[in-house]
Image (tube, rainbow, N blue to C red):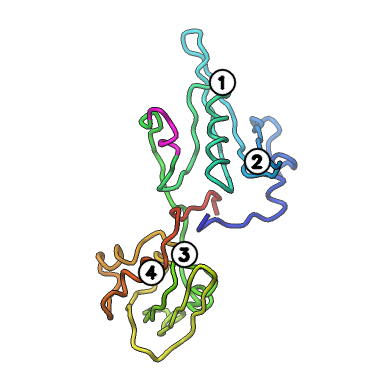
Amino acid sequence: MPGHLDYEADRWGFQTGARTWPGRDDDSPKATHVVWRDAAGDVGGAVSYKVKDKWVDNRPRADLHADILVSTSAEAEREIVRYLTAVDWVATVHLGTRPVDDPVPLWLHDGRAAPQFDRSDHVWARVLDVPAALSARRYAAEGRVVLEVDDPMGFATGRFALDGGPDGATCVPTPDDPDLVVQVPALGSAYLGGCTWARLAAAGWVTEARPGAIERASTMFAVPRAPWCALTF
């Protein structure tokens, strides 16, 4: 998932309940930890949740709160959500912070049964080293674009030639004429694919110095899912 952070090995132990969080109150509600495995037995997703018991008119109406749900595929995420909605006595499931392109409503017979209160990419990106950052990611299509970056703090200022594609990329300083002139905040917005270059240009954050460069850059930087980070940091 673009934007997600790698967990340290120790955190997985705390997150799955194998280890106890330091300083946790022993009287606090215990979470239930569930993992999903594919047909080969490989772990593809995990969720931690707590259930708050509630009865209305002598009928169970418990609330389930999933603090974190992580998965490696849409199938794993869908099956975990299916499991959560089938927990006994639960009437309402809360999934916590969700991505801006959350697919959960589309999995339901009635998508309006899943009102969305908090959608956020939960990501903040500030590029400091342009060659290192742009060389580190892959791109949806082969292409070349020369970026002239303006950074008031001086860290990312310069002109850089990016040659990238699905198999990797190189980005180096260049004296070539720029295709795009961009402020460093806009570069951070485009880096993970959360904003298209076309949208940034429409907002006045990017200037197209060579015709067709906006469309080419938007195609290169496209991602299949909007960036999102499930981990609070």
Tell me which label, 1 or 4, sits earlier in the chain: 1
Residue hosting label 4: 185
Residue hosting label 2: 38
Tell me the kind of residue under disc 1.
Asp
Front-most of residues 52 and 123: 123
Residue hosting label 1: 53
Q: State the residue at coordinates (35%, 63%).
A: 196
Image coords of residue 95 (percent x, y): 50, 37
Front-most of residues 133 and 50: 133
Q: Residue furthest right?
A: 19
Q: Residue furthest top?
A: 58
Tell me which label, 2 or 3, sits earlier in the chain: 2
Residue hosting label 3: 125
Rendered position, 91 above or below 172: above
In space, the residues marked 2 and 1 are separated at their CA atoms by: 31 Å
Tell me which label, 2 or 1, sits earlier in the chain: 2
Tell me the kind of residue under disc 2.
Asp
Residue at disc 1, secondary structure:
loop
The span shown in magenta is 104-110
Tell me the kind of residue under disc 4.
Pro
Image coords of residue 194 (percent x, y): 40, 59
Tell me which label, 3 or 4, sits earlier in the chain: 3
Q: State the residue at coordinates (34%, 88%).
A: 177
Image coords of residue 183 (percent x, y): 35, 74
Q: Quadrant of the C terminus?
A: bottom right
Can residue 230 be found in the magenta stretch?
no
Tell me which label, 2 or 4, sits earlier in the chain: 2
All told, the count of numbered labels is 4
Q: State the residue at coordinates (58%, 20%).
A: 88
